[in-house]
Image (tube, rainbow, N blue to C red):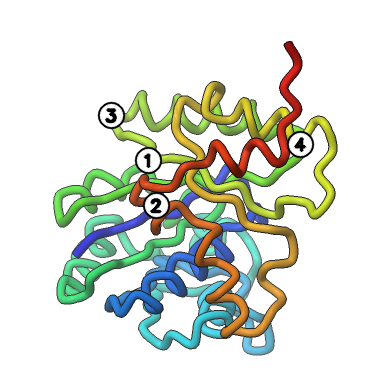
Amino acid sequence: MRIIVVSGTGTDVGKTVTTAALVAVNLAAGRRVAVVKPVQTGAADDAPTDLGTVAQLTGSNDLHCYDSYAEALAPGTAAIRARRPGPSMTSIAEQIATLSDRDLVVVEGAGGLLVELNAAGETLLDLLPLLSGLAETRTVVVTPAGLGMLNHAALTERVLTAAGQSLHGFVVGSWPNEPDLADRCNLADLPRYGKAPLRGVLPARSGTVSPLVFAEHMRPALDDSLGGSFDYSQFLAQYVEVHQ
């Protein structure tokens, strides 16, 4: 089993599409893949959920959630309002350990690293060392193109480093079809500011196509399933203006 943890620089940055992309690419390669959303909020009966989006885009039914709340709030706040503690990070790690027969487990967090996942205030950052004790674990951070991208990426990397955790790289979500100069410069500068490689670029509206198109579309969009073998120099050359 290998674990990829998908976090973000905030909410609505493209984590679920990134998760689905990882699932699609690995399923297409014949691997056994499970998806874990430890805690889901905004899960009212008629509301779309992140795991539902993954299922819609990939056809996967190997989906796992350990607690859910109808209110669209941070999980810790939702747990307090529901008057229950929510799962501890230890219990989440124990349940993920039962998926050890999978080739890959993709764990999607809620928002950023420090969003509280239960009423006790535990976060994804608290879960990471427990997962590293189970299997090789890679953390990727999704950041959207646009204002704040570099600042939020750098802050997230510093939080991980301060906690003794490493950052495998960044995925840029919602990359515009017609990037402007700021977008292009930000993309080129991301590895320097965030101190981690660029591992993937997901086009805007990539989560609105059919499952078969999505799987094929995502194949070149991720760096060998975040393994590190793809050369982004050619990709960057298409979008970055180099000024001497």
Residue at image location 40% in from the left, 75% down from the top: 65
Q: Decide which of tag 3 and tag 2 comes sooner along the chain.
A: 3
Q: Residues within 10 Å of mark 4 (few under 14, many from 20)?
A: many
Q: Position of residue 218 (x, y in %)?
A: 55, 66
**Residue under circle 2?**
226
For this rendering, which residue is in front, 220 or 80?
220
Contact (Cβ within 8 Å) of mark 2 with mark 1:
yes
Q: Residue at x 52, y 41 (%)?
A: 232
Disc 3 from disc 1: Cα separation: 13 Å
The answer for how far apart the CA atoms under marks 3 and 4 are is: 31 Å
Please name the amino acid that badge 2 sits on.
Answer: Leu
Which of marks 2 and 4 precedes in the sequence? Answer: 4
- For badge 3, the amino acid type reads Gly
- Per the model, the C-alpha gap separating discs 4 and 1 is 22 Å
x%, y% of residue 33?
32, 75
Which numbered disc covers residue 146? none
Mark 1 lies on a secondary structure that is loop
Residue type for callout 4: Asp
Q: Separation of disc 3 and disc 2 at Cα? A: 21 Å
Identify the residue under disc 3: 164
Q: Amino acid at mark 1?
A: His
Horizontal arrangement in the rendering, residue 222 relative to residue 181 (left or right): left
Quick one: SS at disc 3?
Answer: loop
Mark 4 — residue? 183
Residue 169 at x, y = what percent?
Answer: 44, 40
How far across and down, in percent of the image, does residue 22 sit? 44, 65
- Marks 3 & 2, CB-CB < 8 Å contact: no
Mark 1 nearby-residue class (10 Å; few <14, some 14–19, many ≥20): many
